Image (spheres, rainbow, N blue to C red):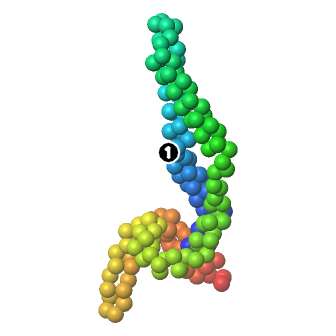
Amino acid sequence: MIRDDLLSDEAAEVFAIMVRSRMEQLGAKTGASVMAGRQERLKEELQRLVDAVATLGVSEALAQRIRSTERELRTIEEEIRVAADAAPERIDAGKELRKLLMNLEGALKASPTEARHAVSEILGPVKIQLKEAQVWAEIATGPALRIAVGAGYPITGCGGRI
């Protein structure tokens, strides 16, 4: 039942949104954003050097510094272009989710700690009780769960016609 819910189109869409969000977060920390920042700083430095030449006149030290800054700026611009041309790795989130969920039992057995955490996220607090030779798990029942299981309605079904 849980597997069917998790395999639904709605669950796949939520998972895809989460994956895209995480990929964007990771992308913001990549070298491309660092290089773009460095590119801006180099342009600002180059402008300051040109202003210094206009004010003080050209000197060998300033000319050398301008050439060095221009060289680094060209290198950074080329690296940014190469990074932009490289195709980012695309993930079919729906396919990956379905593959994972089809092996749900194996995944739960492989990592019981993570399985317990996942189940507790779904069910909320679970109180384990030992009653004679049986182990019982008690969970909180909110209004949605009570409606889902038909609590408060006659158990005869269809007004007793079944």
- In this rendering, the answer to whether 33 lies above or below 19 is above
Seen at 32% across and 86% down, the residue is 130
- In this rendering, the answer to whether 159 lies above or below 70 is below
Seen at 49% across and 7% down, the residue is 57
x then y, percent, for residue 125: 37, 68
* Quadrant location of the N terminus in the rendered image: bottom right
Q: Is residue 126 left or right of residue 25?
A: left
x then y, percent, for residue 99: 62, 71
Label 1 neighbour load within 10 Å: few <14, some 14-19, many 20+: few
Seen at 63% across and 69% down, the residue is 98
Q: Is residue 85 left or right of residue 115?
A: right
At label 1, the amino acid type is: Lys
x then y, percent, for residue 154: 55, 77
Residue 87 vs residue 159, the one in the foreground: 87
* Quadrant location of the C terminus in the rendered image: bottom right
Residue 21 vs residue 8, the one in the foreground: 21
Residue 42 vs residue 69, the one in the foreground: 69
Q: Is residue 100 visible?
A: yes
Query: What is the secondary structure assignment of the residue under circle 1?
Result: loop
Q: Is residue 10 left or right of residue 46?
A: right
- In this rendering, the answer to whether 112 lies above or below 74 is below
Q: Which residue is mark 1?
A: 29
On the image, which quarter does residue 114 sit in?
bottom left
Seen at 38% across and 83% down, the residue is 136
